[in-house]
Image (tube, helix red, strand yellow):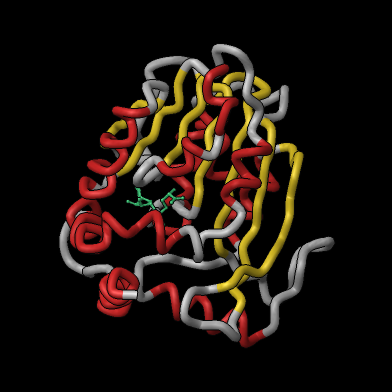
Amino acid sequence: MVTDTRTLFTLVRGLPRKGGLADRLGAFYGPQAHHYDDFRERLLHGRDELVSLLPVRRGGVIVEMGGGTGRNVERFGPRLARLKSVHVVDLCRPLLEIARQRAARLPKLLVHEGDAGTWRAPEPVDAIYFSYSLTMMPDWRAALDNAIGQLKPGGTLGVVDFYVSAERAEDGLRQHTAWTRAFWPRWFGHDGVRLSPEPLACLRSRLDTIVLAEHFGSVPWLPCLRVPYYIFVGRLPARAAPGRFAGRRAARL
Ligand SMILES: C[S@@+](CC[C@H](N)C(=O)[O-])C[C@H]1O[C@@H](n2cnc3c(N)ncnc32)[C@H](O)[C@@H]1O
């Protein structure tokens, strides 16, 4: 309860509007860093499912962009032993500090301070995932481009995140009410989290969909409300070898 109060206070205060992104994220997450994992376990749904859907081959390399405290790496459970490494990339120093403490227990976890829009893995990558981080990235298109551009041919990209549907949802997708489409972007926008239909549309256009699930999740302290989120897992089409995306970016996004 006391720890929730501190987290709720920083959420109500919101993401600072001035300064560079890394400093703003540090100011926002710093005061709640030690309670981040506990609170987000009740807010950021579907992370176990996303990680369970990622392919884990012996000696494989996986990257989490915007991985924060590295908590999601624990979700691999015994499968982690098969992997060569899981790289966690983030811009927020207070959360990275928690991730480094975690890495002391989990040698496969490698922690990097970097921007998801530009950070490059030091080795070929089998799968990249974004867990509630794309919506926090001002240039999420650059982050997706950067991720897709460094996947091995046939590599996997996974995303779990909040979203809202378009006013007229694409065929086969859920249609959210006008209230849902107006309320949640405003509610989360205060904390720098931008809910929109665009990232999911972009993922579907650039990757072969393997799994797409749309859900509503509970929100701590708001018992009557449910926020929409999706889980997407896609594969790089065989025809689209890494590097060829760069030239097609403007046309495809
Ligand atoms: C809501 S948190 C999610 C953290 C973690 N993935 C999880 O599931 O708990 C969003 C994360 O994205 C990070 N982030 C935002 N913009 C970023 C960027 N451009 N590059 C790297 N990380 C970024 C934030 O610092 C934060 O750790």
Q: Which of 62 and 79 is in front in this view?
A: 79
In the rendered image, residue 106, in percent from the top left (x then y), is placed at: 38, 27
What residue sits 31% from the left and 39% below the top? 99
Question: Residue 244 sits in which quadrant?
Answer: top right
What residue sits 20% from the left and 63% below the top? 31
Question: Residue 142 sits in which quadrant?
Answer: top left
Work out which residue is located at the far top of the displayed protein and give it. Answer: 59
Location of the N terminus (image quadrant)? bottom left
Left-right relation of 143 to 12: right
Left-right relation of 23 to 81: left
Q: Nearer the viewer, residue 149 or 53?
A: 53
In the rendered image, residue 174, in percent from the top left (x then y), is placed at: 76, 68
Work out which residue is located at the far right of the displayed protein and give it. Answer: 172
Q: Is residue 167 above or below residue 207?
A: below
Q: In this view, does 35 lie above or below 64?
A: below
Q: Is residue 207 above or below residue 83?
A: below
Left-right relation of 150 to 67: right
Question: How many numbered dots are placed on residues in this image?
Answer: 0
In the rendered image, residue 248, in percent from the top left (x then y), is placed at: 57, 36
Task: Look at the image and tell me whether residue 51 can be seen.
Answer: yes
Task: Look at the image and tell me whether residue 247 can be seen.
Answer: no
What residue sits 53% from the left and 19% below the top? 81
In the rendered image, residue 90, in percent from the top left (x then y), is placed at: 32, 42
What residue sits 83% from the left and 61% below the top? 172
Q: Which of 245 and 150 is in front in this view?
A: 150
